[in-house]
Amino acid sequence: MSLAPLRVNAPQDRPHSRPLSAIDPAQLRVCFVASQRPEAQSALRRLAHIYGNSPFVDADVVVALGGDGLMLDALRRSLDNGPPVFGMNRGTIGFLMNDFSDEDLPHRLTQAEAVWISPLLMQAQTSQGHAMARLAINEVSLLRQTHQTARLRIRVDGAVRMEELACDGVLVAPPAGSTAYNYSAHGPILPIDANLLALTPISAFRPRRWRGALLNHDAEVEIETLEPEFRPVAAVADNQEVRDVVRVTIREARDRQLCMLFDPNRPYAERVLREQFES
């Protein structure tokens, strides 16, 4: 079976590969996007009035106003040759966001530091013999479809690391997605520039004390469904679901890159440290 081909975006082919620092702040084309929260919508109107609001396809940079969910949505829109994304927190926690300010924003954007991330590539095989490929920025998760506990076998780089995991599910998250579902499942928050993946169980029943693993970012994780006819499992790449999977492989899609922008003082790193030491 062959997988549907994915477009390859080589860095040298991207129209937005020119650093923002090379652009005159007065000429910077900014696309503002916002969540539906009232404070985000208010910020959108004010910033668009001050700086204008370029269409996404013409923008040098996207400014996302909201929380981490909106930031990841904006990054998802940038998967195919899109501009870099700078988030400003108009949500709640906002791990991936910079502090909000409407002062001298073009200069701030041209001074921002770029962090390049790669999405995850999920390749799933179903019990009907279909093969599907999906990309994820948040995480790839496997979840039981019925009341029956999922039984999964986990391989890392071809070697069986867990013969059988009985659970509600399991997920793989990169640093950018580690503050989302992974964190809710008690997985670790990863620094945005960490070359790691989090492998996190969801309500593990056996082995009950297993809390997951940290893997090198270039690891390939293969998850096999045991007894799929009695214990059906769905695989989800962000919000893209494939049902009745029998085997799923997950790895970084290193031929696809997305650019996140942070203020030079990097408040994200401080938030990650603070969260890990809070009781």
Image: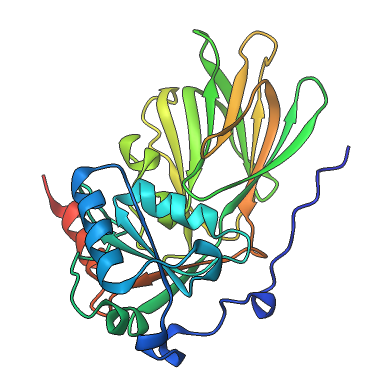
Q: Left or right: 57 with respect to 191?
A: right
Residue 144's place in the image compared with 112, above or below, is above
The C terminus sits in image quarter: top left
- Total marks placed: 0
Scheme by which the image is coloured: rainbow
Residue 87's place in the image compared with 138, above or below, is below
Q: Position of residue 166 (x, y in %)?
A: 50, 21
Residue 5's place in the image compared with 245, above or below, is below
**Residue 249 seen:** yes
Q: Quadrant of residue 123?
A: top right
Q: Give 37 or 233, whichever is nearer the viewer.
A: 37
Residue name at image x 78 percent, y 34 percent: 131
The N terminus sits in image quarter: top right
Q: Left or right: 277 with respect to 223?
A: left
Q: Position of residue 144 (x, y in %)?
A: 53, 19
Q: Quadrant of residue 272?
A: bottom left
Residue name at image x 27 percent, y 55 percent: 95
**Residue 188 seen:** no
Residue name at image x 42 percent, y 29 percent: 202
Residue 75's place in the image compared with 279, above or below, is below
Q: Position of residue 229 (x, y in %)?
A: 70, 11
Q: Quadrant of residue 124?
A: top right
- Most extreme residue toward the right is 1
Q: Position of residue 58 (x, y in %)?
A: 53, 70
- Most extreme residue toward the left is 279
